[in-house]
Amino acid sequence: MAQPKNGVTADDVKKIAKLSRLHVEADRLQPIAEDLNGILAWIEQLSEVDVEGVEPMTSAVDMAAPMRADKVTDGGKRDDVLKNAPKSDDGFFVVPRSVE
Amino acid sequence: MFIAPRIADKKDWITTDTGDWEIIIGLEVHAQVASESKLFSGSATDYGSAPNTQVSLVDAGMPGMLPVVNEFCIEQAVKTGFGLNAKINLFSRFDRKNYFYVDLPQGYQISQFEHPIVGEGEIEILPIDGDGNVGEPVNVGIERLHLEQDAGKSVHDLSPDETYVDLNRCGVALMEIVSKPDMRSPEEASAYVEKLRGIVRALGTCDGDMEKGNLRADVNVSVRRPGGELGTRCEIKNVNSMRFIRQAINFEARRHIDILEAGGEIDQETRLFDSVKGETRTMRSKEDAHDYRYFPDPDLLPIKLEQSFVDRIKAELPEMPDVRKARFMSDYGLPEYDARILTADKTKADFYEIVTKGRDSKIASNWTMGELFGALNKAGLELEDSPVSADALGGLIDRILDDTISGKIAKDVFEKMFAGEGTADEIIERDGLKQVTDMGAIEAMVDKVIADNSGQAAAAKENPKLLGFFVGQVMKASQGKANPQAVNKILREKLGL
């Protein structure tokens, strides 16, 4: 397989998984790194394109963000918002303790 | 990378056995936009509402929900940019700052990384030391201002092994104002925050309420030998009062110096300020420092402002504190110190302008700053909660200016007004404090005092200092109500001085 210039290692995968709060078994790190490198190598073909003098594109649609007026039009749906929470109490989401 | 060319004033150096050190300070201030609804959703932003009642499905990070920008928030950011004398970027963009935390259901904060809405600017600050001495003006550079979402609130004391999460604040618009590392003392840092607070309050873009956390500062501190190479900095998160800012910087600078002098190295880390103990402590170290993996938010199109939109905002700007200060000095003839204190905050400046309307401006300033601010400070009250209104204070000054009461009696009347006993006129009437201006009556009192103290009266010609004694006696006889100028004048005549 072609290796991209800035390929990822098993350690990179471990780090990204940790940052993304994903659990990846140790024996999957290397295969995932290889998959990612395959994708990166494919995308790297883009670097062959000459983009001299072309502004970076932020969006595929050439328009500015639509905006809304500063009015309260939402909220007041506490029960809906809490519905999927594994645990709630007294109107709060309740989660495992996040500080020591 | 930041550079920090200015060297601190010698008075701000910290001198130890090994020599001199200076403190380098930069601040990131988060100012909550005074909007009705959130940055990307129509939920309300009210403070202190029941938990999770101001949360939409967008704020809760539900799949498939799309953010829509609040135009008012964009406008406030531009306005504040003008207040900071900064460059307004017609093109800006929102990026995702990725991290996981219980009070951030999206898994990322929408912020502006590469293209902030406001670029570089500069403001002038006047630091004041603990004794009230105004220092030399210092220019503080602004690196940028960008818009971002606030996070929710985690409550850790409702259960021993769980965290309670309220998302009411989640998604509220914040303006993050980043300074250059241009401050060199705790006093400069707090003067900077005070200046920012004055600017956003004058503009009405943020209410500046630090107690509610609507304006809070992250403080970056490092130390170096004066003019030497920059040291490693630590960031102290969420410091929410001017006093705490100064305390945190003092503590942190000392900590750095102690470590460096013991031959150690500073770890670049994020720290918390414990306001009870007055110290900072590690929050997270470099090892688990965040890697935010910023990228443009694909749910949001870039913000492209029309020049006409920006021009309109500029044309509608209210008077800024610096301009108002200059006007107070030129129009009212106030000294710089008075003008600075009075215009640091819009509420104070508005109050003063009512007090001084049609009255002597320096007397109005003395009564507003000296008596009223002093009394409020002592009582721990904000000007908004003053028991004496601007009109009422003006009414008291009127009675001084028309000689109804002396300045001395006025202080007693003021105390009673502050205690809620009524208007100046009511108190003067009730307590019979009207100054005696009847020349005949004063003359009679003077005659009596001279007759009772004939020995001193004879000696007064040789020793004019005795005049003070006679003035005191007459004032005492009149229970403080005689007009002091009239007493003086008549006494001089009668004693032949």
Image: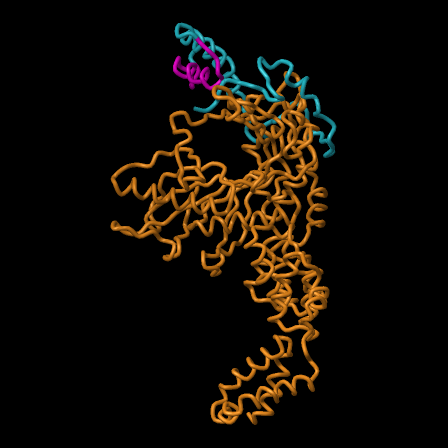
In the rendered image, residue A97, in percent from the top left (x then y), is placed at: 48, 20
Give the total of numbered labels.
0
**Does residue A12 belong to the magenta stretch?**
yes
Please identify the quadrant where the C terminus of chain B is shown.
bottom right
Which hue is chain A drawn in?
A: cyan
In the rendered image, residue B471, in percent from the top left (x then y), is placed at: 56, 82
Task: Return the residue nearer the eye: B290 or A44.
Answer: B290
In the orientation shown, which residue stands out farthest toward the front? B452
Q: Is residue B353 above or below residue B207?
A: below
Q: Is residue B51 above or below residue B401?
A: above
Q: Is residue B330 above or below residue B234?
A: below
Q: Looking at the image, what colour scheme do you see?
A: by chain
Which hue is chain B drawn in?
A: orange
Task: Return the residue nearer the eye: B325 or A4.
Answer: B325
B55 relative to B274 in the view: left or right: right
Please identify the quadrant where the N terminus of chain B is shown.
top left
In the rendered image, residue B95, in percent from the top left (x then y), is placed at: 57, 28
Which residue is found at the position 60% from the left and 67% from the top? B334
B30 relative to B57 in the view: left or right: left
Which residues, given as a range, are shown in magenta?
Answer: A4-24
Task: Return the residue nearer the eye: B361 or B139.
Answer: B361
**Does residue B68 belong to the magenta stretch?**
no
In the rendered image, residue A17, in percent from the top left (x then y), is placed at: 46, 15
